[in-house]
Image (spheres, rainbow, N blue to C red):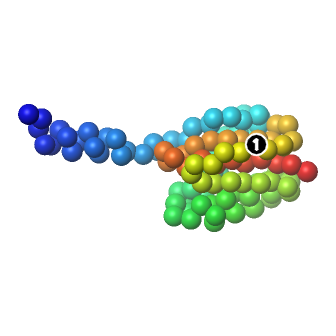
Amino acid sequence: MADPNETKKEETDARRLQTFPICRHSDMTEEMKVETMELCVTACEKFSTNNETAAKMIKETMDKKFGSSWHVVVGEGFGFEVTHETKNMLYMFFGGNVAICVWKCT
């Protein structure tokens, strides 16, 4: 029979969240991509219970740093198809199941 402590350990391992960002797609320059990913991680950690506020923080910061017309979606279980300016799109995951899509259009 299985050890009860071992079963609890397996359940804990299964629920462990990833603590690093994973970039699924980006056509940004490497410097811009790194800066945007750091901003997204900061916003999601700061507003971990409110995706709308995190998206607003990311959008406002991107507008200031890289010019206006940035759009941001932060959430779980969504699909998307967007038209964007080339070299201005990032799609990443953070914290296990939170997805962040950042793009610029005119």
Position of residue 36 measured from the top left corner of the image (x, y, whole percent):
69, 46
| Residues packed near mark 1 inside 10 Å, few (<14), some (14 to 19) or many (20 plus) | few
Position of residue 88 measured from the top left corner of the image (x, y, whole percent):
80, 42
Horizontal side of 78 relative to 4 (left or right) equals right
| Nearer to me, 95 or 3 | 3
Quadrant in which residue 28 is drawn = top right
Residue at 80%, 58% in the rendered image? 64
Q: Residue furthest right?
A: 106
Quadrant the N terminus occupies: top left
Position of residue 41 measured from the top left corner of the image (x, y, whole percent):
58, 50
Position of residue 57 measured from the top left corner of the image (x, y, whole percent):
68, 62
Quadrant in which residue 91 is drawn = top right
Residue at 84%, 43% in the rendered image? 83
Residue 3 visible to the viewer = yes
Residue 42 visible to the viewer = no
The residue indicated by pointer 1 is: 81
Residue at 12%, 35% in the rendered image? 2
